[in-house]
């Protein structure tokens, strides 16, 4: 079955970086874009960015530009999200989520998509 | 940036009720809107995409409508498992609405 399995919880000090992994299985990894979404305690969902596992191209939310890096390893069907210069406000659950649009020649078709499969979430706590 | 405004933020209803949640976009987004359900401690679940298309496996009591700037999610007859938080998401910049918490009256 289609599944996304994320790495375990992290505790980091302010100013440090964290790298969260998301391993995909049950489908062709390079055929679907992957999103990262976070949720601070008691708060709503916040989109962070998207990566095309085929070519590795990325697009980040303006809020995270310069602090976030999304990469992928096609040999292990894994995407990574690294967030640097951590502060207490980055304490959140971080999710990877697959965009359900099947890409054509590595590009998502121009119709509305959505996130149909989600990882279980990774809790990142930033505390001194 | 296109902003989304969801209303209401909180909604109290009973099993069997019909409920509607609204999502308004600050600019027209055609049908580039999705709806998600999230239960405490769980990842969100896709309910509706392209404003009105029901995701596979989602009960038919859920429906979505709208285009342009105003969208609605309707649950025709609330079931106990429907009490959760609902989010809209616009699919151009992937921004989420602030959420609607649906509670049992």
Image (spheres, helix red, strand yellow):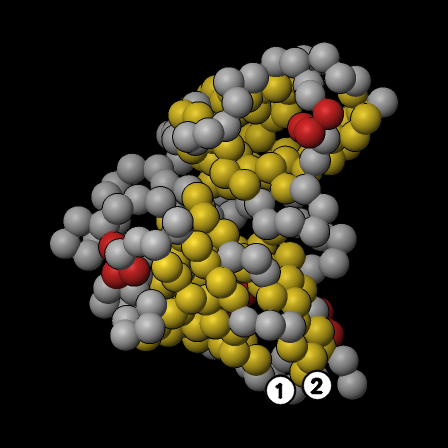
Instruction: Please state the chain letter of the residue tagged with numbered disc 1 in the rendered image.
Output: A
- Across and down, in percent, residue B75 comes to 61, 19
Q: Is residue A42 above or below residue B46?
A: below
Quarter of the image containing the C terminus of chain A? bottom right
**Mark 1–mark 2 CB contact (< 8 Å):** yes
Q: Is residue A65 visible?
A: no
Looking at the image, residue A127 sits to the left or right of residue A79; the answer is right
Disc number placed over residue A16 in the picture, else none: 1
State the residue at coordinates (29%, 37%).
Answer: A111
State the residue at coordinates (26%, 56%).
Answer: A28
Q: CA distance from mark 1 to mark 2?
A: 6 Å
Q: Is residue B46 above or below residue A22?
A: above
Disc number placed over residue A13 in the picture, else none: 2
Q: What kind of element bears circle 1?
A: loop
Q: Residue furthest right?
A: B105
The foreground one among B94 and A108 is A108
Q: Is residue A83 above or below residue B56?
A: below
Q: Is residue B69 above or below residue A98?
A: above
Give residue B32's quadrant in the image: top left
The foreground one among A80 and B3 is A80
Looking at the image, residue B59 sits to the left or right of residue B104; the answer is left
- Across and down, in percent, residue A61 comes to 47, 61
Q: Residues within 10 Å of mark 1 (few under 14, many from 20)?
A: few
Instruction: Please state the chain letter of the residue tagged with numbered disc 2 in the rendered image.
Output: A
State the residue at coordinates (41%, 30%).
Answer: B56
State the residue at coordinates (48%, 72%).
Answer: A21
Give residue B30's quadrant in the image: top left
């Amino acid at each position: 079955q289609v599944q996304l399995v994320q790495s375990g919880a992290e505790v980091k000090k302010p100013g440090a970086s964290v790298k969260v992994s998301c391993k995909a299985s049950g489908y062709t990894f390079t055929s679907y874009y992957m999103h990262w979404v976070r949720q601070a305690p008691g708060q709503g969902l916040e989109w962070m960015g998207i990566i095309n596992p085929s070519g590795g191209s990325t697009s980040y939310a303006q809020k995270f530009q310069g602090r976030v890096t999304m990469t992928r390893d096609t040999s292990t069907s894994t995407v990574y999200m690294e967030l640097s210069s951590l502060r207490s406000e980055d304490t959140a659950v971080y999710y990877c989520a697959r965009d359900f649009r099947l890409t054509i020649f590595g590009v998502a078709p121009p119709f509305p998509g959505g996130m149909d499969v989600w990882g279980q979430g990774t809790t990142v706590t930033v505390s001194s | 940036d296109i902003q989304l405004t969801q209303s209401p933020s909180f909604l109290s209803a009973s099993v069997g009720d019909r409920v509607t949640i609204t999502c308004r976009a600050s600019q027209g987004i055609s049908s580039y809107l999705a709806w998600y359900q999230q239960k405490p401690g769980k990842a969100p679940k896709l309910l509706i995409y392209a404003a009105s298309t029901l995701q596979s496996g989602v009960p038919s009591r859920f429906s979505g409508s709208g285009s342009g700037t105003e969208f609605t999610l309707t649950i025709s007859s609330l079931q106990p498992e429907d009490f959760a938080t609902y989010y809209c998401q616009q699919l151009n910049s992937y921004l989420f609405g602030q959420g609607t918490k649906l509670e049992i009256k």
